[in-house]
Every structure is written in structure tokens, then in C-alpha cells.
Image: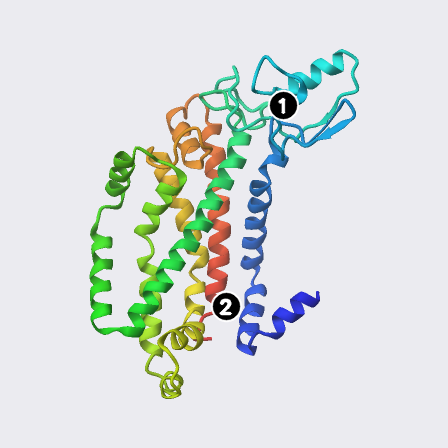
């Protein structure tokens, strides 16, 4: 409570009023609850879905296999490098040993293949299995985490590049502004999907970071343009002239005087940027140009759902609901922020 009071005491009356306006909106709370639900279950996916036990008590020792990786040799297993904890616990309990384990509520790993190919929802597999016999519940939870992490990192990188370039462009104007605008125009006319395919083909990689770098390379210009407009309108105001007259450096004027006054409208774009990154990844995975298999992915589940819609409709319905839930929640937060921080109010 003391930390919150310390934070709020540093906010201006206008900022406090805006945040109060945000939290007074019902759609803001709906969005926050929806987003936090996705965040909680996906970011702690190992606790909810895993083939490894959360707690294992064996031979007087306590282990945490879901969180800590152990080698087979540590359990006295010499004929394999992969530990089947379910089988090991079952076998030792049948032998009368005092082995005890607490497994997650869903005892499947997202990469674990079974003989139940495209099995319908059941007690064993809550949302069925996919075309390789993998548990859809597990792949959905881990896929949500990948999507959410991708969206958040995508937002951070877009804003870092966009704010930096937009600040330089709007502050210095002139030739700097001219050449950066031409660069942005070039980025906007390049065919995005073709470049993704080309880069993945040349690098022979469709990893998380390669895909992210390519998408960010095409997405930072919107943030830069927004901040450029803010800087162009603020750089000639009296407080900037006073700072220059006092001998302030360009960096001090940019980061101390202009940026704090121009960043608020940009921050309202945050939820939309995150949702845009998540949607882009889902589309790329759906088309087969996103993350490499067998990475859990909502787009990959959607692609399977389209292929096997007549035999396994759950493969299409569940990722559609999960993706819609996440995007709608984030967009509700974004709309509420834009409403609360509207400078005309």
C-alpha cells in the first residue's frame, strides 16, 4: 500500500484523473480480467500442464521436476536418457516403495506424442488431441504463452526503435526528417510476407527471434510517425526555447522536456501494438511461415483445424476462442486507455 501511495503521489493531477477515468470504465475491467486470466494460466503453464510432477518424493528426497531439470542418472536410470515420471512413479508404487508425486491437473507435455491421434475431448485429453496425438490443452496453454511473450517483446522492440527514430526525426527535422521519411516509405511499400519468406529461406531458419526481427523491421514506423508529429508540435514551444537559452544539450531537451510531454498519446497505442504482434504471429504460423515445428502455436492449431475440420472440429474451435478472448481483452484495454487519455477531454 505504501508503494502504491508513493507512486501515485508522483503523478500529476491530470495523470491521476486520467487513470481514474480508465478504471471507472467497465470495459477496462473486463479487458483486464480477461488479459490477466490468459497471462496467469499461460505464463505458469508448467504448473497447469506437464508430464513431469510438481513435487516428487522418492527415497527420502524431494524433487521438483516441473521446475528443475534432472538427469536420468540422478534417479538411478541407466537404460535411457528420458525420464517417464508417470511410469516410474507407477512402477515404484506397485513395488511397494514410498514414492509419491503431485502431478499438474493436466498431465501432458505440449510436445508429447501419443497413440491417440485426433482423439475427441475426453477425461484423459480435455480438448482432444491433434494430428500427431499431442494434447490440445497443453499445446493451447503453451501456445498462448508463446503468443503473449511474442506480442510483449514485439511491442517493446517497436517502441524502442520507433521512439528513438521518431524523436530524432521530429526534433532535428530538416534533412534528417526527409531521409528517414523516405526510409519509412520504402519499408511500407515492400511486400511484408515475401520478405519473411525470403529471409527464412536465406537463413534457413524460422525461429522465434528471426521471425520477430523481421516483423519488427516492418512495424516500428507507425510509432515513429506518431512521435515525430508530437515532437514537431512541441519543439517550438516556449519551454524548449527556454531550455535552449539556458544551454541545455539536445539530449536533455529531448529526454527531459519534450519526450515526457509527447509520450502519453503513444502509450495508448501499447495494447493495440501487442494485439497486432499476436495476430501477426498467428497469421504467419497459420500460413506456415512463422515459428518452427514443434513449437506450440495458436496459428499452427488453427491450420490443423482447417485441414481436419470435418474430423476434429475441436482443433479449430478451441484456438479460435482462445485467440479471440486474448485479442478482445487487449483491445478493450486499449480502447479504455484511449478514452481516458484523450487530450480533448
Image x and y of residue 53, in percent = 66, 28
In the rendered image, which quarter is residue 138 located in?
top right
Q: Residues within 10 Å of mark 2 (few under 14, many from 20)?
A: many
25, 277: nearer the viewer: 277
State left or right for residue 127 relative to residue 247. right
- Residue 148 x/y as whole percent: 48, 45
Of residue 73 and residue 256, the one placed in the foreground of this image is 73
Q: Is residue 76 above or below residue 252?
A: above
Residue at image x 52%, y 29%? Answer: 110
**Total tally of numbered discs in the picture:** 2
Name the residue at 41% across, 50% down.
154
User: In the picture provided, is 178 more to the left or to the right than 131?
Assistant: left
Q: Please, is residue 72 above or below residue 163 in the view?
A: above
Q: Position of residue 194 (x, y in %)?
A: 24, 41
Image height of 286 relative to 262, above or below? above
* Percent of width and height locating residue 329: 51, 51
Residue corresponding to mark 1: 123
Secondary structure, mark 1, is loop
Q: Work out how far the residue at label 2 is from the one at label 1, CA to CA, in angstroms.
A: 45 Å
Q: Nearer the viewer, residue 59 or 90?
A: 59
Q: Residues within 10 Å of mark 1 (few under 14, many from 20)?
A: few
From the viewer's perspective, is 199 left or right of 290? left
- The residue where tag 2 is placed is 340
Q: Quadrant of residue 40?
A: top right
- As helix, strand or loop, the secondary structure at mark 2 comes to helix
| Residue 194 falls left or right of residue 32 | left
Of marks 2 and 1, which one's residue comes earlier in the chain?
1
Amino acid at each position: 500500500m505504501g508503494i502504491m501511495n508513493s507512486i501515485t503521489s508522483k503523478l500529476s493531477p491530470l495523470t491521476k484523473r486520467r487513470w481514474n477515468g480508465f478504471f471507472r470504465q467497465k470495459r477496462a475491467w473486463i479487458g483486464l480480467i480477461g488479459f490477466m486470466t490468459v497471462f496467469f494460466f499461460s505464463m505458469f503453464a508448467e504448473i497447469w500442464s506437464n508430464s513431469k510432477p510438481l513435487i516428487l518424493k522418492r527415497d527420502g528426497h524431494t524433487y521438483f521436476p516441473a521446475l528443475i531439470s534432472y538427469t536420468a542418472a540422478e534417479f538411478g536410470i541407466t537404460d535411457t536418457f528420458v525420464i517417464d515420471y508417470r511410469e516410474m512413479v507407477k512402477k515404484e508404487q506397485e513395488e511397494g516403495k514410498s514414492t509419491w508425486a503431485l502431478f499438474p491437473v493436466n498431465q501432458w507435455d505440449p510436445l508429447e506424442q501419443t497413440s491417440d491421434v485426433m482423439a475427441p475431448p475426453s477425461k484423459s485429453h480435455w480438448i482432444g488431441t491433434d494430428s500427431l496425438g499431442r494434447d490440445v490443452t497443453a499445446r493451447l496453454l503453451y501456445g498462448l504463452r508463446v503468443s503473449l511473450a511474442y506480442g510483449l517483446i514485439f511491442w517493446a522492440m517497436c517502441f524502442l526503435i520507433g521512439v528513438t527514430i521518431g524523436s530524432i526525426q521530429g526534433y532535428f527535422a530538416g534533412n534528417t526528417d526527409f531521409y528517414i521519411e523516405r526510409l519509412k516509405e520504402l519499408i511500407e511499400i515492400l511486400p511484408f510476407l515475401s520478405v519473411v519468406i525470403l529471409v527464412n529461406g536465406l537463413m534457413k531458419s524460422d525461429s522465434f527471434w528471426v521471425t520477430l526481427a523481421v516483423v519488427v523491421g516492418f512495424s516500428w514506423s507507425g510509432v515513429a510517425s506518431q512521435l515525430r508529429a508530437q515532437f514537431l508540435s512541441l519543439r517550438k514551444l516556449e519551454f524548449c526555447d527556454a531550455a535552449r537559452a539556458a544551454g541545455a544539450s539536445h539530449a536533455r531537451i529531448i529526454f527531459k522536456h519534450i519526450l515526457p510531454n509527447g509520450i502519453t498519446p503513444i502509450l495508448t497505442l501499447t495494447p493495440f501494438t501487442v494485439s497486432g504482434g499476436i495476430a501477426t504471429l498467428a497469421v504467419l504460423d497459420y500460413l506456415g511461415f512463422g515459428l518452427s515445428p514443434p513449437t506450440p502455436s495458436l496459428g499452427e492449431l488453427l491450420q490443423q483445424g482447417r485441414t481436419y475440420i470435418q474430423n476434429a472440429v475441436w482443433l479449430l474451435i478451441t484456438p479460435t476462442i482462445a485467440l479471440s478472448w486474448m485479442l478482445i481483452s487487449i483491445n478493450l484495454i486499449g480502447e479504455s486507455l484511449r478514452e481516458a487519455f484523450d487530450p480533448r477531454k
